[in-house]
Amino acid sequence: MTHYVPGLVVRADGVPAAVEELRLPEIGPGQVRVRIRAAGVCHSDLSMVNGTLRPPHPLVLGHEAAGEVVETGERVSRASAGDHVVLNWQPACRSCWFCDRGEVWLCSTSSGVAALENGMTVDGEPVHVTLGVGAFAGEVVVPENAVIPVPAELDFDLAALLGCAVLTGTGAVRNTAKVAPGDSVVVIGLGGVGLSVVTAARAAGAAQVIAVDLAETKKGLAEAAGATDFVVSSDTLSKDIRARTSGRGADHAFEAVGRAATIRAAWRATRRGGRVTVVGMGAADDMVQLSALDIFSSARTLQTSVYGQADPDLEIPALARDVVAGTLNLSHLITDRITLADVPAAFDRMARGEGARSVVVL
Ligand SMILES: [Zn+2]
Ligand SMILES: [Zn+2]
């Protein structure tokens, strides 16, 4: 049976995304059909429309989502109809060289796939789906390893955040940077990921979490997430951070923007021997310049964290249990609940640096 669902589609570079009817692909062996119940507006979706990335068109946006399984194909064992699931945009194949080493976030069968062909427009033109998901749609058809069952008590809007911002931010703190009790931490960029880094750093026992953003209006969000300090970013940022860290700079800096300028700012905000963890995804032509002498003598480590360097199949259910148990509070991350048609306005808010997460509720 053919299923038609609404989806938020970009037709070409520079053309605003619009809701249109889509024809879902037939469900195949090993696939599941999921009714999307909530989908977060992530910076990577904005990157698909603002020229940072160059995806193929037509493109269905959205990748941070949760929903309910409505149909399973042959040989599906991971989920059944009625299960509540979080979508995983980097599902591990469990058989490539990286997966064999346990580095499933680098799985070679899915990494680097910005947009996969899946489904059609009503006119029969093939459509692409963002990060293999295309979650700004009524329903999606995905391989079974792209769904992760979570408890039914977990609200769909919070569950959606686990699929990108929260896993990315939490994993960057725990798995990549390995923030330790007593550490000082700087977080630059307070979107959904940056605020998740703040929360995870405090939970890891950081004594000081200095939240940095261009917008003074982020102060309340930073404090709700657990920041001990808030600094409005300016040309004197490294001085401001040093003034708050005994003149040394922080043990850790997290860059959650994805720009060369903020990566350099994060570098300068850390102490000698400190660690800089880049979580934001930037553009191919935005070059980071560091001097060879500085790299050597500062003894800092510059590293990135892809999808929180996590195994989502293990860590998303664990985060879900923490939310249900009340030990992980994410409600402050959602500042706007919107419809599919409101997503372009949410992109504008994101570009202006307003709010935290907008979540499409379906
Ligand atoms: Zn994302
Ligand atoms: Zn793999």
Image: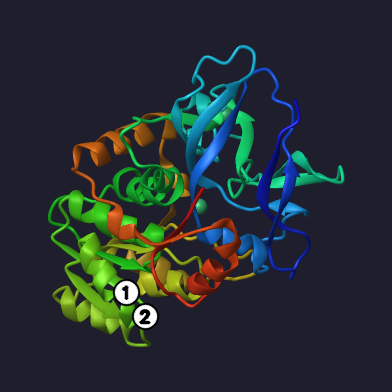
Residue type at the position of mark 2: Ala
Horizontal side of 89 relative to 158 (left or right) equals right
Residue at horizontal 19 percent and vertical 50 percent from the top: 203
Q: Give the image location of residue 328, x and y in percent.
A: 23, 46
Q: Is residue 22 above or below residue 240?
A: above
Q: Is residue 41 above or below residue 73?
A: below
Residue at horizontal 55 percent and vertical 36 percent from the top: 35
Residue type at the position of mark 1: Lys
Q: Which circle marks residue 340 in the picture?
A: none
Residue at horizontal 33 percent and vertical 48 percent from the top: 170
Q: Is residue 139 above or below residue 70?
A: below
Horizontal side of 115 relative to 278 (left or right) equals right
Give the spatial CA distance, label 2 vs label 1. Answer: 6 Å
Q: Give the image location of residue 173, x and y in percent.
A: 31, 50
Q: Which circle marks residue 218 in the picture?
A: 1
Residue at horizontal 40 percent and vertical 38 percent from the top: 310
Q: Which circle marks residue 215 in the picture?
A: 2
Image quarter hosting the N terminus: top right
Asked if disc 2 and disc 1 are in contact, CB closer than 8 Å, the reply is yes
Determine if residue 238 is in view.
Answer: yes
Q: Quadrant of residue 303?
A: bottom left
Q: Name the element at disc 1.
A: helix
Tag count: 2
Please identify the residue farthest to the top as the structure is shown: 75
Horizontal side of 137 relative to 222 (left or right) equals right
Q: Name the element at disc 2.
A: loop
Ligand 1 within 8 Å, label 2 CB = no
Ligand 1 within 8 Å, label 1 CB = no
How crowded is the residue under tag 1: few (<14 C-alpha within 10 Å), some, or many (20+)? many
